[in-house]
Image: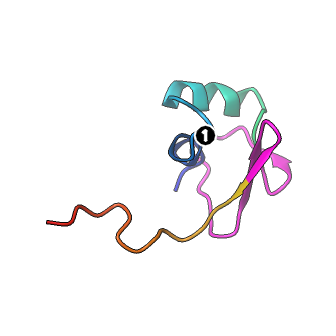
Amino acid sequence: MKLDQFLKLHGLAATGGEAKQRIQAGDVRVNGVIETRRGRQLALGDAVAIDGRELLVMPPSPGEGRADR
């Protein structure tokens, strides 16, 4: 998953535009290092921090992202 998508998915940015601005401004850290690339591919276990909050990249829950019919 890309960094900007992660921020939106977890409510750390309201829109893609906000995610882009926050990342480019240097407000986001990945594994303790400022990350300015919004397309940065995240790996399982990466720690994403913004505004004093830190979230770990975890595997998707069973059925997540799937439309059950």
Q: Farthest residue in the right direction?
A: 32
In the image, taking residue 20 as reference, residue 35 lies left or right, namely right
Q: Which residues are magenta?
A: 30-54
Q: Position of residue 18 (x, y in %)?
A: 58, 25
Q: Is residue 33 above or below residue 61?
A: above
Q: Residue at x 66, y 41 (%)?
A: 37
Q: Position of residue 42 (x, y in %)?
A: 62, 59
Q: Residue at x 79, y 36 (%)?
A: 51
Q: Farthest residue in the bottom direction?
A: 62
Q: Farthest residue in the left direction?
A: 69
Q: Is residue 28 above or below residue 24?
A: below
Q: Position of residue 65 (x, y in %)?
A: 35, 60
User: Based on the displayed image, in which of its 4 quarters is residue 36 positioned?
Assistant: top right
Label 1 secondary element = loop
Q: Residue at x 83, y 41 (%)?
A: 52
- Magenta run includes residue 51: yes
In the image, taking residue 5 as reference, residue 29 lies left or right, namely right
Q: Which residue is mark 1?
A: 38
Whether residue 3 is visible: yes
- Magenta run includes residue 47: yes
